[in-house]
Amino acid sequence: MKEFLKKILKAANLYHPLQLFYRQLMFSSKKRYLRFRYRKFKKKIFTCNVCGNYYSKFAPAYPSAINRAAIQNHAVIAGYGENIICPNCLSVARDRLVLAMLEKVDLQQKKVLHLSPEKNIYTFLSAKASVETADLMPGFYKNIDPNIREADATKLPYAGNYFDLVIGNHILEHIPDDRLAMKEIFRVLRSPGMAILQVPFSTEL
């Protein structure tokens, strides 16, 4: 029944708009809750490099029940744990890490490909560089970039040696043929170029 309803909503071009509305509603509710809950922790210990606010601790983030067992059994570092979510803007640790790296890069007049774009990273990039965004399901990201392009990371619709920088934050682990995706990213990168491709990591696998 759930898949049948999803097909109907997609056929009516309502699925992604409704999903976006739901996600934005949940995001706003969570932001209000965390700002209230963590107001007593407003001390200069941790500073968010997205919004500039500081707290003595950030909010934790834990994996879903589906992923928890695999993460624990294989000692996977996947961006979960304590002090992950900024209580003010809800940025997460993996976004702040990318921003910390980008702050050291000269982005002026650079061409950037941002796969599955995160809002905070896209906002930072688009103020400094020429940014193109792409995803296999672009409807989920129209609120970030209305011009996002539908694209498969294993078959990117771009010429070779086109981008100075490619960012794919926690996407490779969702692609069955991740080696082909990395070859495609390498193909579209200029030389010298750079790719930031964060993924869950374990020395036990």
Image: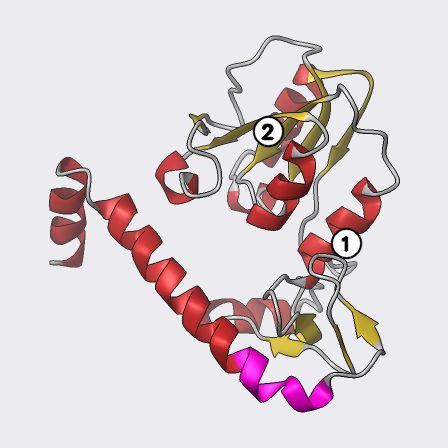
Q: Quadrant of residue 92?
A: bottom right
- Residue at left 53%, top 40%? 116
Q: Amino acid at mark 2?
A: Ala
Disc 2 to disc 1, how far (Cα)?
22 Å
Q: Position of residue 23 (x, y in %)?
A: 38, 60
Image x and y of residue 173, in percent: 58, 47
Q: Name the residue tied to disc 1.
A: 97
In which quadrant will I find the C terminus? bottom right
Looking at the rendering, which quadrant does residue 12 occupy? top left
Give the SS element for disc 1: helix
In the image, is residue 119 part of the stretch drawn in magenta?
A: no
Label 2 belongs to which residue? 181
Q: Main secondary structure of the magenta part?
A: helix
The magenta span reads 34-41
Relative vertical location of residue 114 with respect to residue 49 in this rendering, above or below: above
The answer to if 40 sits in the magenta stretch is yes
Is 170 placed left or right of 163 in the picture?
A: left
Q: Which mark is residue 67?
A: none
**Image position of 21 with respect to 40: above or below:** above
